[in-house]
Amino acid sequence: MLSLTLPLILINAVVSISAFSKSEIMARYQFNAYMIYHRKQWYRFITHAFLHADWMHLIVNMFVLYTFGQFVEMNLAYHFGSISPLIYILLYFGAIIVSSISTYRKHKEDHWYNAVGASGAVSAVMFSSVVFGPFMKIYLYGILPLPAIMWALIYVGYSVYMSNRASDNINHDAHLWGGFYGMFLTLVLSPDIARNFISQITDFMR
């Protein structure tokens, strides 16, 4: 089955790199809740997720998407066969929208607030992978192995802390809500997936 993860990475790279040297692209398509609310530019809910602030932002997001995306696609294909690409698209693009709703409500009167990045969608893919393999070992920088579910809990705690501080220009709310959406959607897709996840958790706790 043809992977959707690699085309998504390619599109993100092409659009983001183009915008690095063309500020008009960034200005027109980045997430700006004020412009969405007052000018009805609803397309920004989607387009901002294909833009990134800089090379590091792009590379990190695409590395995480590459790391977890194909694992999620493989498991979706096992459970859903030929319709699995549609479910992966729902996971990815649904997360872009869902992860932006909180930010939209919070900043719809703040004309100065802008955000870019695929973090909400990437978080959804990462947390979906946690449902399929909660105890698969993930190595941070190749040296610190922890189960995927532990990294997910650390990630949630970090996102909540940074969102409350609001001391940087990163939309940590998108990370958090994207992750929750990815986990929730994956669990409700199939009783078998939910049962398998619960079984792995209970077996580990025995």
Image (spheres, rainbow, N blue to C red):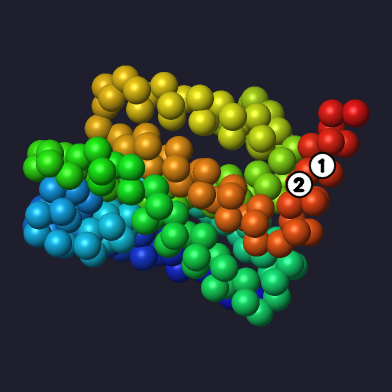
Q: Position of residue 114 (x, y in %)?
A: 18, 43
Q: Residues within 10 Å of mark 2 (few under 14, many from 20)?
A: some
Which mark is drawn over residue 161? none
Per the image, label 1 sits on a secondary structure element best described as helix
Report the quarter where the C terminus lies. top right
Given contact means CB atoms under 8 Å apart, are the residues at marks 2 and 1 in contact? yes
Q: Is residue 162 above or below residue 122?
A: above
Is residue 134 visible in the rendered image? The answer is yes
Q: In this view, does 16 lie above or below 153?
A: below
Q: Is residue 34 found left or right of 65 in the rendered image?
A: left
Q: Which residue lies furthest to the right in this view?
A: 206
Q: Which residue lies furthest to the bottom in this view?
A: 82
Q: Position of residue 123 (x, y in %)?
A: 49, 45
Question: Residue 44's image quarter?
Answer: bottom left
Residue located beneath label 2 in the image: 197
Per the image, label 2 sits on a secondary structure element best described as helix
Q: How crowded is mark 1: few (under 14 residues within 10 Å), some or many (20 or more)?
A: some
Residue located beneath label 1 in the image: 200
Residue type highlighted by circle 1: Gln
